[in-house]
Amino acid sequence: MPETPEMNGAESVVRSLHAAGVNVCFANPGTSEMQFVDALDRTGLMRCVLCLFEGVATGAADGYARMAGMPAVTLLHLAPGLANAGANMHNARKAQTPMVNLVGDHALRHRGYDAPLTADVEGAAAPFSDWVRTATGPDSFAADAMAALAAALSRPGKVATLIAPADIGWEAGGVLAPPPAAPAFAALEEGVVARAAGMLGPDTVILVGGGVLESPDALARLNGICAATGASLRAPTSNRRIERGAGRAGISKVPYPIDQALDALRPFRRAVLIETVPPVAFFAYPGRPSLLLPEGCETVTLAGRDGDGPAAVAALADHVGADPVIPETTRPAPPAPGPITPEALAAAVAHALPGGAIICDESLTGGRALWGATEGAAPHSWISLTGGAIGDGIPMALGAAVACPDRPVLSLQADGSAMYTIQGLWSQARERANVTTVILANRSYQILKAELTAVGANPGRSALDMLNLDRPDLDFVALARGMGVPGRRVEDAVELQHAIAAAMAEPGPYLIEAAM
C-alpha cells in the first residue's frame, strides 16, 4: 500500500480553514504563496477567485462576509501586496466585517539578506488589522490560522492577518487544528434596559448599528418603541448591511454633510446607543464641532458593538410594552423622459429593483436621493462603503455575488472611485457574477468639490482641474468590454430604468454608464 505523503504547513491551514466553514479564497498570489496555490489546487476544498489587484481581493472578501456571515480568506503577497490591499481592509475594519488575510513572506532563512521585496509585513498589517501574527512552524501553522479565524469571528467582527513565511508553508509536519469556539455576545449590563427606557421621549434619539440593521424584526420593534414613546430613530451614516424595502420597517440615517448632520441631531437631549457609538463628523471643518450630538446630550449604551443588539431591542420593547410597527412605504413616481438627475436615478432604481436584490452602494454624491426613494422598493439588502476609502464598490459587489449566487446584485458606483478597482470587472466576468454595475458618470470627484467649499475655499481653474475627470473623458463601456463585461451608455432616465431591469433579469455581469 503506497505511503501517504506527510502534510505540509500550507495544506494543514487550507484543510483546517475549510473544516471551520471557510469556503472561498480571494487571491492575488506571488512566489511566496505558491505552496498555498498548490494546496488549494490539490485539496479542491475552496472556491478560488483570482483578483487582478490586492484591493479587489480584500474588497471582495468584505462584500462576501457581509452577505455570507462567514469570512472568506484572502491570499496576498508580501508587504507591497498587503499595502495595495490596505484601503479595503480599512473599510472592512470600520464595518466590523470578519476577514482573514493570509500574507506570504520570505522564508525565515531568507529574511536577513534584504531581498528586493523584503519589508516589515507586520508593520504594514498593523494599521488595517485588529489581529496580526507571524507563523513560526508548520506544526502550529493551522492553530495560528484558527486563532486568526477566532479573532475575525469575535464580537464585533475583526480583520485578522496571518503572515506566512514561505518555508513554514512548504515544510512537512503540518497538523490540523480544530475550529474555534463560537463567539459569545457581551451580556446586557444589569439595569440598563430600565435606564434606557426611562430616557425615551420626544427629545430622545435611538442610534442603532451593526446586527440590529440586519434584522427586520428588530427594526420593526424599534419603530414600535418610537411610536409608543415619541423617540426618534437613526442609523449611522455608514453601515455594514441593512435589510429594507416594502414590508419592512425603514430607518433614517445621519446625513453625511456636516451641517445637515448637526441640524438632524440638534433637537435631541438624550441618546440611546445600540451596537454603535456617538456619531462623529467625517472630517473637521472650520467652526463646526467634531461630535455631532448636541453638547451636553445624555447618552446610555443599551448594547455595545460586542453585544446582541436585536436581543437588547426585544428587551427594551417588552419593557415599554411596544408592539412591532411597520410603517407604510411608497415609491416615487417612475422617472419621466429626460436627463438623469440624482432624483431620476433614484426613481429608476426604485422601480427597476427586483425582490431579493442586493444593492452595493458607492454612489456618493450622484446617489444622494437613493436612500429615501428605495424605502418602498422591493425588499432588498443594502451594503455600502463604510470606512470612506473609496474603491470598495466594484469588488464588494463581486464578493456579494459569490456569497449569494441566487440573488442579483446592483452595484451603484461613482465614476471617480470606480477607477480605483476597475480590475474587479474582470473577476466578475471570469466568475460569471450576477452583478449589474451602474456607473454614475458625472465626470468629476463631485464630493470633493463640496468638501472644497465646506472648508471655505473659492476654487479656481487649477483646483477644479484636480477634481474633474475630463480631458480625456472616461469610456466605461469600452473599459468594461475590454475585461469581458458587456455594457451600454444611457442618457435618458426612462431608458435607464428599462436598462437596469433588463440587465438584472439576465445572469452574469453587465455595465451601464449613466450620463449625469
Image: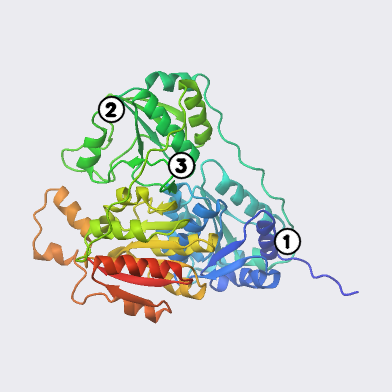
Pick the front one: 174 or 433 = 433
Pick the front one: 282 or 161 = 282
Q: Mark 3 points at which residue?
A: 210
Q: Mark 1 points at which residue?
A: 174
The disc placed on residue 314 is none
Q: Which amino acid does label 1 sit on?
A: Gly
At label 1, counting other C-alpha atoms closer than 10 Å, the crowd grade (few under 14, some 14-19, many 20 or more) is many
The picture places residue 287, in percent across and down from the top left corner, at 16, 38
Residue at 49% across, 50% down: 97
Q: What element carries label 3?
A: helix
Q: Is mark 1 on a helix, strand or loop?
A: loop
Confirm or deny contact between disc 3 and disc 2 (CB under 8 A).
no
Confirm or deny contact between disc 3 and disc 1 (CB under 8 A).
no
Which label's residue is closer to the chain start, 2 or 1? 1
Pick the front one: 509 or 483 = 509
Q: Mark 2 points at which residue?
A: 268
Quarter of the image for residue 414 reads: bottom left
Residue 433 visible to an observer of this rendering: yes
The picture places residue 380, in percent across and down from the top left corner, at 44, 53
Which label's residue is closer to the chain start, 3 or 1? 1
Quadrant placement of the C terminus = bottom left
At label 3, counting other C-alpha atoms closer than 10 Å, the crowd grade (few under 14, some 14-19, many 20 or more) is many
Residue 391 visible to an observer of this rendering: no
Residue 430 versus residue 464 in the image, above or below? below
Quadrant placement of the N terminus = bottom right
Q: How far apart are marks 3 and 1 (CA)?
A: 37 Å
The mark closer to the camera, 2 or 1, is 2
Compared across the picture, whether 164 is left or right of 258 comes to right
